[in-house]
Amino acid sequence: MLRITKTICVDRNPYDCFTYLADLRKLVEWDSNVVSASKRTQGPVAKGSRFTVGVNLGGIRIPFTYVITEFRPSDRLVMTGRSLLFNVNDSITFTESERGVEISYCIDFYFKFGLSKFFTRRRDAFEQQCQSAIDHLKSALEQAPCEATLSPESARADKKSLSTLKTFTRLGYSSSRKAWQPVTERMEGLHVVLTGANSGIGLAAAIDLAVAGADLTLVVRSQEKADATLRVLSDETGRTDFKVELADLSLINATDSLARRLLEHGRPIDVLINNAGALFNQHSVTQEGLERSYALLLLSPWRLTEALMPLLSHHKKPSRVINVVSGGMYAERLNLQRLNVSSDGYRGARAYAQCKRALNTLTEIWASRWAEHNIVVNAMHPGWSDTPGVQTALPLFRIITRLVLRSHREGADTVVWMARSDQAGLSSGKLFLDRQPRSPYLLGNNVEAPEQRTALEARLSEDHLKALNRSANA
């Protein structure tokens, strides 16, 4: 048996440090020897949770199966890992001091097949690797954020269409994460309003935000969907303290009612995530006389965000608006005549892309206008994710790309980062993919005419009033 012990002191509270280290998926953020980590059991991280961790040892990737055997929040964490060549036992203790929290990390290595002498002779190499990892852990827990930038690799990819499209896949996700800063911030006491929370990217984001401690108000369309969402969140996080608001956001009257309820409740909003959406291949019109894509994907998030501005403004720390758009918008130039179209010539993918293009334009407008109110506004697109919308509305696309589609959690990662990370709060008016600011125009194409940008909000205001009048007269 070989034992290595390292100790650091960080200026954080014990609970933050404990929760960060207990989730072994975070190992990839601070241990350069770890190339992959995934959780294998359902439910919140606790005693008995299992993880698969891929470790690079001398250029060879060795899979470990880890299980948490002792779990005492803010006090002590013990994990055992098993692999083909050796097993490990990690014991971590957390002790408060005047300088913050002292973290003592003890690792016991148990070698198999008579390899003990071989590895023991290389104790110095193990010591160096462990010291490097613990130094990176200290940096992760204490680092000051710097504004997110485009990596050189992504910058090169943006110069070619096919390379850019590759970044939309799960390969682009795994490549980009190499440049990411660790996310160690907790969200206790922060109020997050999330639309479209019942499936796909919205549900994945809700789970991760709940694990981070956020107070969630979840907007879903029906009580049936709300009940199913709450069951999943409870099973995955162990929490039941979520607030649900029912609203069909394809109806502007329902959107206004939702905004009124939230305003009457009066709780400040730290993060508003406009995620609700769907791609409709068949043209349809709501009872308020609006084409359904336009109502749900653009007019509703515009109205909700504008109405909730009083709850977003003048926080001590900048509040955040996150608009979920789509890479499909790259194929469209903003054209107000292609919004709220009739059935003649209707194409679901074009209607979807036009609305997402317009929502990204609103992101830039709001960011400029609301900077003095201490509101950060950004957009993100999740890449190509295997969402329910892709499965039902784009079956051929899914067949072609199914091997490289991202999981819901991978698609939601940037949403969670934008809501949680101090780093994300340093940018406004940007479009993000994989935690990096990207151009909203692919290769500089499809830049809208200035008059289209200028007329956008007036058009939305006009259609909002028309929809309310139709609803009142229905």
Image: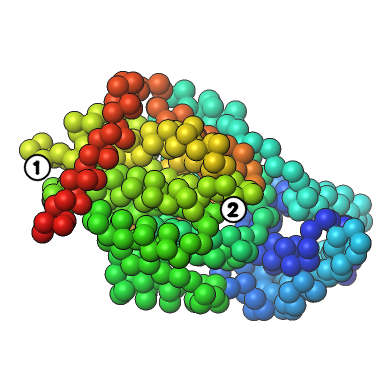
| x and y, in percent, of residue 341 in the image | 15, 39
Q: In this figure, which residue is indicated by the disc labeled 1? A: 343
Q: In which quarter of the image is residue 82?
A: bottom right
The residue nearer to you, when weighing 192 against 278, is 192
Give the mark, 2 or 1, whose residue is nearer the N terminus: 1
Residue 383 as seen in the image, left or right of residue 32: left
Task: Name the residue carrying label 2.
Answer: 420
**Viewer-side residue, 80 vs 303:** 303
Residue drawn at 36 percent across, 60 percent down: 260
Cβ atoms under marks 2 and 1 closer than 8 Å = no
The CA span between labels 2 and 1 is: 41 Å
Specify the label residue 431 is tagged with. Answer: none
Could you say which quadrant of the image residue 107 lies in? bottom right
Image position, residue 333 (x, y; %): 29, 27
Q: Which residue is drawn at 48% across and 47% down?
A: 321
Tell me the quarter of the image containing the C terminus.
Answer: bottom left
